[in-house]
Image (cartoon, helix red, strand yellow):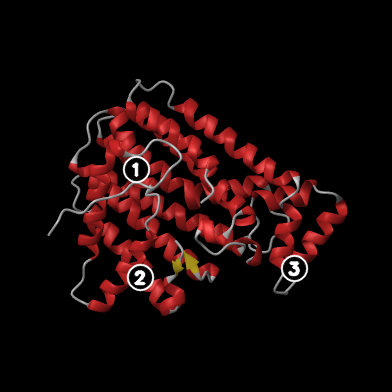
Amino acid sequence: MPAKTYSPPAYPIERMDLIAAELAAVVERFEEELGSDLPCVNELTRHVSRFRGKMLRPTLVFLCGRAIGELTPAHITVATVVEMVHMATLVHDDVLDEAAMRRRGATINRLRGNEAAVMLGDYLISHSYHLCASLTDPVVARAIARTTNQVCEGELLQLHNRGNLELDEETYITIISRKTASLIAVSCYLGAKLAGADDAAAKRLEKYGLSLGIAFQIQDDILDITGEERKVGKTLGIDIEKRKLTLPVIHFLQHAPAEHQELCRSLLGADEPRAAERIRKLIMPSGSIAYAHDRARRLVGRAKQGIAELPESEAKQRLIAMAEFVVERSL
């Protein structure tokens, strides 16, 4: 059987050739771990593998490891684990959001229904812990477990605030810090620790990942309003349809002209097919998109500042480039 390869995504930054072999190993390990003697299970896991996109979290595991020292076989395992956890959250999110498209293809829930999608998400989670258990250091498994708990807490907090038109920016940041940024942060932390980083250096990279992850989610939320489905590759406008307030909407409801705020609130409570599209058109030309962009850029600046003390290396430069890409991407 020919060796599996991984083609890095077409980032508008330098290609990730520095860690291409390691990313290819993650793809191979991912598929090996999820293999089943049941064809129906294999069919679903093959489909969910199409959701693999930027592989941001494995990339950060490897770059943070390289920024500190040498990569080890444990880096491959951890990178595969965090990608499995991430994939599970995507599958479950699509159920919660009733999304029909991801990575320009049908979601699992669209193809096979919510029951199969929920069980597949659980299957991914259980395999991530099965794989994590192969590592001898219990600190790694506990860090992954703690982070997965935080992801679930963030989702529950977001569900609790669905339809809360008074949601403030601080609570929104808490939601995305747990739901999205925590897994990115632990990817950076474990990548560094497995390469021999001391606590101070590992914590700096963890903070880099947390700031990067929050900025990443803010940009995602901006694209949910301003993006094009054919380009972004997933169903857009879902946050508005589900009345999940994101940073641009929160800012708009607090700073737009009073009549625009009132219209937006009425549309958020309306049960009509075009309500989400009308809200998107209302917010897009406002200063709320620029405000969210600025908040994301400041977070990226904080992320870069956090790794300034690391020794100069090619990996460090790639981490800086990754941070800049987060707020410039359109998909």
Q: Which of marks 2 and 3 is nearer the N terminus?
A: 2
Number of numbered discs on residues: 3
Closer to the camera in the image, 165 or 86: 86
Instruction: Give the image location of residue 234, x and y in percent.
Output: 51, 62
Q: Which amino acid type corresponds to the residue marked 3 in the rendered image?
A: Gly
Measured in 3D between alpha carbons, the distance from the residue under mark 2 to the one under mark 1, in whole angstroms, is 24 Å
Q: Is residue 244 above or below residue 200?
A: below
Say which of marks 2 and 1 sits in front: 1
Find disc 1 in the rendering and name its residue. 59
In the picture, the disc for residue 269 is 3
In the structure shown, which secondary structural element does the residue marked by tag 2 occupy? Answer: helix
In the structure shown, which secondary structural element does the residue marked by tag 1 occupy? Answer: helix
Residue at 73% across, 55% down? 166
Instruction: Give the image location of residue 257, x and y in percent.
Output: 85, 49
Measured in 3D between alpha carbons, the distance from the residue under mark 2 to the one under mark 3, in whole angstroms, is 33 Å
In the structure shown, which secondary structural element does the residue marked by tag 3 occupy? Answer: loop
Closer to the camera in the image, 3 or 168: 3
Q: Which amino acid type corresponds to the residue marked 1 in the rendered image?
A: Thr
Instruction: Give the image location of residue 168, x and y in percent.
Output: 69, 49
| Res 203 seen here | no
**Quadrant of the rendered image containing residue 196:** top left
In the picture, the disc for residue 120 is 2
Q: Which amino acid type corresponds to the residue marked 2 in the rendered image?
A: Leu
Q: In this view, does 165 lie above or below 289?
A: below
| Res 72 seen here | yes
Q: Is residue 139 above or below residue 92?
A: above
